[in-house]
Image: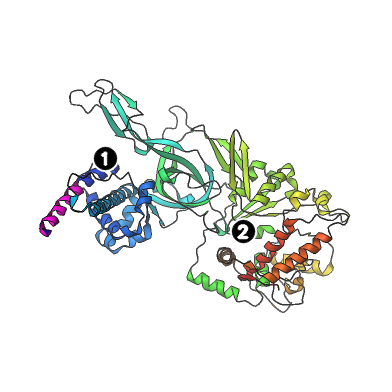
Amino acid sequence: MVTLLHRRYICIFIALFHMIMHKGEKFYMSCYDDSSPSVEKIKVFEKYFTSKIHLYDKDEIERQGSVLVDYADLTGDKTVRSRLPDVITELKEQPELMLKCLGVAIHQVLTLDLEKQAAELQGEELSVATPIINIPHISARLYNYEPLTPLRMLRASVFGRLVCVRGTVVRVSNIRPLCTRMAFRCLACSHTQSLPLQHGKYATPTKCIQLECRSRSFAPSRSSPLTHTVDWQIIKVQELIGGEQRETGRIPRTVECQLTSDLCDSCVPGDTVTVTGIVRVTNDGSSRGNKDQCMFLLYLEATSVSNTKGTSFSGGEEFSLKELYAIQEIQSQPNLLRLIVHSLCPVIYGHLAVCNVAPRGIYVCGNSTSTTGLTVSLSRDAGTGDYALEAGALVLADQGLCCIDEFDKLGNQQQALLEAMEQQTVSLAKAGIVSSLPARTSVIAAANPTGGHYNRGKTVSENLKMGSALLSRFDVVFLLLDIPDESHDRHLSEHVMANRAGRGRTSSAVVTRASSDFETSILLEHSDMPLSERLKIPADETVDPIPTCLLRKYISYARQYVHPSLSPEAAQILQDFYLSLRSQAHCANSTPITTRQLESLIRLTEVGFYVLITPHNVKD
């Protein structure tokens, strides 16, 4: 009895295998040949997926129509490397074929697994005539592909190859249906046949497949069951520029990426994404008539999109063991805050140095910035005519830093910052389109007083011609007054001349003079000495500044892994200080004190422990 049942199952699975091969192949390859080299690749990938079938959520794969495949795990598998020694090269140079083989393999594995489960449930009542479970087309989404390709390297030499790029999404189009297989009806015999449309390019059959007809006239049947469409979307990705990658004198490079099926709606403007895809070309949309038909535009046919918006920090920083040891060494320094302060701007003073150190920073100048350039704009796509959102500076600096110079030159554009600094979002309501984009950014602004000098008889708002609603949204406001001081001017001139002469920095004992009015000592260890004095460098002492690349890693590490919390004692101190400020706010010409100031105090308290990489905020 056991032998007969065993033979029965063998016959069943042999029949299923041949039926599955036919069913799966029609989704991926137009023509299938048993002698094709692709058969060996499919068998190898089938063994790979079989060994990891317990790691996949079958219902989720069937619902999404895709499966995530880790590039490092696939190419590092012993079975794959032994039977396909050139798998890395083939994935790079023949990505379309290899991805189809991966899709066929996972399709067969899932179908066999589901049929096996059905057989176990039905037991001995299973017959060969049992219908096979229909699984839709499954796309292999290859992620963690290496190496990352800079956008400046996307040239004609990489056409048709698999690449991986990282950047910021600056434009997102509407989702439209893309036809991948069209049904055509013969005008002579009314026979219907389907034709695959490669890369979304429309084509018609060359002749009717009926032996008696051979007509060459067809009409598309868009409502036919043989016509297949998928979701289609275009995004524009702009390169990440920062630090040593910063290039001046040219606009940032961008590349359009084509998303299909489950990849649509995976990102919004301002997100930092890693796109793995195949380099394709399309006709230049700007060409007219038959002119310049040999000019093409490069774009990416995306196979996977990794979005970092779900993480606590979108800088995408990764840390090696050597960098972690360096961060630990920096954190163990006795006077860490002084070291970091003097490492931020060893040569250049001002917020621009902070922008260069920030892992994700955007710099704009107020006299050449518009409202849409700061927030978000609505533009019409030249090809489809649909509206598309284009991100501005605040959206591009999401979870980063936005530096605005010449803030007093913004004029009415200052009102565009109110929502972003309060709600951390940017809203748009135009042409019947209402949208909201994340703008979780820190704003650093530099402004000059009216008339070129600061009038002590007026308030800060009156000197800067800035509304109190906007001014109250800044956590701290520093007044950098140029007061003649012989000692300060002497040290400053020595510092400037030393830098010009190439001798490096001199004693920086007075570089923190602008912070002399900052009285709190919560950022440092126990000490009765004022902060301005503790940040000074003695004449007989030198400080070796932290390199910019390492300082950027230190800041990224702190933002990702440090989550400070207020202790009850520290919360009580902040509450008492806030209440005292509220009680003094009734004087003439005083700045209104609201809950924004309390939130600012909490954020300033947390900043010190980000710097020191300490998890708890104590009262000191």
- Image coordinates of residue 386 in percent, x first then y, are 52, 33
Tag of residue 489: none
Find disc 2 in the rendering and name its residue. Answer: 356
Q: Is residue 523 visible?
A: no
Q: Is residue 423 left or right of residue 530?
A: left
Residue ID at (35%, 59%): 55
Which part of the image, by quadrant, shows the C terminus?
bottom right
Marks 1/2: CA–CA distance: 52 Å
The residue pinned by badge 1 equals 30
Looking at numbered disc 2 in the image, what kind of residue is underneath it?
Answer: Asn
> How far across and down, in percent of the image, does residue 457 sit?
89, 54
Sort mark 1 into few (<14), some (14-19) or many (20+) by Cα contacts within 10 Å.
Answer: few
Q: Which residues are magenta?
A: 2-18
For residue 410, what is the image quadrant?
A: top right
Circle 1 — which element?
loop
Residue 391, image quadrant: top right
The prevailing secondary structure element of the residues shown in magenta is helix
Is 11 magenta? The answer is yes
Q: Residues within 10 Å of mark 2 (few under 14, many from 20)?
A: many
Residue lying farthest bottom? 540
Q: Is residue 231 left or right of residue 187?
A: right
The three-letter amino acid code for the residue at tag 1 is: Ser
Q: Residue at x 54, y 53 (%)?
A: 240
Q: Position of residue 58 (x, y in %)?
A: 34, 52
**Quadrant of the rendering where the N terminus is positioned:** bottom left
Give x and y (percent) for residue 211: 18, 26
Viewer can see residue 111:
yes
Residue 487: quarter of image: bottom right
> Is residue 353 shown above or below 537?
above
Q: Earlier along the polypeptide chain: callout 1 or callout 2?
A: 1
